[in-house]
Image (cartoon, rainbow, N blue to C red):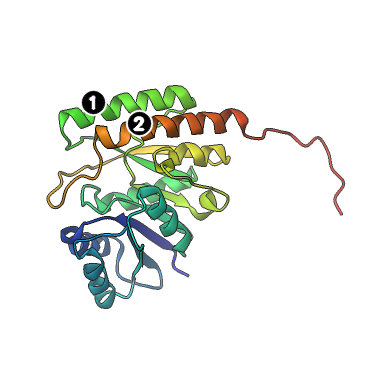
Amino acid sequence: MPELSVIIPVFNEIDNIEPLTTEIIQVLGSDSDRIEIVFVDDGSSDGTLDKIREMSERYPLVRWISFDRNYGQTAALDAGLRAARGRYLVTMDGDLQSDPSDIPGLMKGLESADLVCGYRRKRHDSFIRKISSRIANGVRNRATGDTIIDVGCTLRVMRRECIENLKLYEGMHRFFPTLVKYEGYSVIQVPVNHRPRLHGKAKYNISNRLFRAVLDLFAVVWMKWRRLRYVIKERKEP
């Protein structure tokens, strides 16, 4: 079983697969007994899966899952986490905007927490995306009582135990750190690099995520107030 699994959901990112794989190997090494890269192809139509297959033939540490159609980021994230075999799990986007060289620093954070979330120190996005994300983060934190700086940053490192009892629903990738905290695990945040997109197109904008994000927020707030809370006073062991 590998020590570390890197899970990467992708949708139409054909030009980013090879350089991202190369960068990860440069940072973490290519020992397939210690490291694995798990791509989850979310129904791409641009040849992304063929490029992933090519990488898996070249590098034994590359594994992949392919959906029959596009199911969305939460489904791809969940499938990758369930398929990963590592003791420690890394999640990141496949658009090359996350920097693999940040992974070792995030790993050090596991000395004091169960989940280490990156937050983008200097974002290379449009002004509208920056402002909308800042507002969304503020509303989300106020409603959930959380303090996550940048929930849109998917570069995270966690212990495997964090996901063992975690149940994700569509859209819940936006609340991943909060849901992990609800399970009783500790979360810290670490600044990471953010790079401009060189290939492909962004998959999200205000119009295609606002309404769904509001509905998802209601669901998470409901979970917060309705989750079970009890303390066992004493028990008789068998």
Pick the front one: 19 or 202: 202
Disc 1, SS: helix
**Which label number is shown at residue 211?**
2
Q: Earlier in the sequence, mark 1 or mark 2?
A: 1
Instruction: Tell me the kind of residue under disc 1.
Output: Ile
* Left or right: 136 in relation to 187: left
Residue type at mark 2: give it: Phe
Query: In what quadrant of the picture does the C terminus appear?
Result: bottom right
Using a 10 Å C-alpha cutoff, classify the residue at mark 1 as few (fewer than 14 neighbours), some (14 to 19) or many (20 or more). few
Residue 235 appearing in the image: yes
Quadrant position of residue 175: top left
- Most distant residue in the bottom direction: 57
Residue at the image position 40 percent from the left and 29 percent from the top: 214
Question: Camera-side residue: 190 or 47?
Answer: 47
Does residue 155 lie above or below 59 as drawn?
above
Identify which residue, 48 or 130, lies in the foreground: 48
**Is 132 or 157 nearer to us in this picture?**
132
Foreground mark, 1 or 2, reads 2
- Residue 34 sits in quarter: bottom left
Residue named by callout 1: 131
* Place of residue 223 in the rendered image (x, y in percent of width and height, measured from the top left): 56, 33
Q: Residue at (33%, 53%) from the top-left corner? A: 104
At 58% from the left and 40% from the top, the residue drawn is 184
The image quadrant of residue 43 is: bottom left
Against 18, residue 76 (above or below) is above
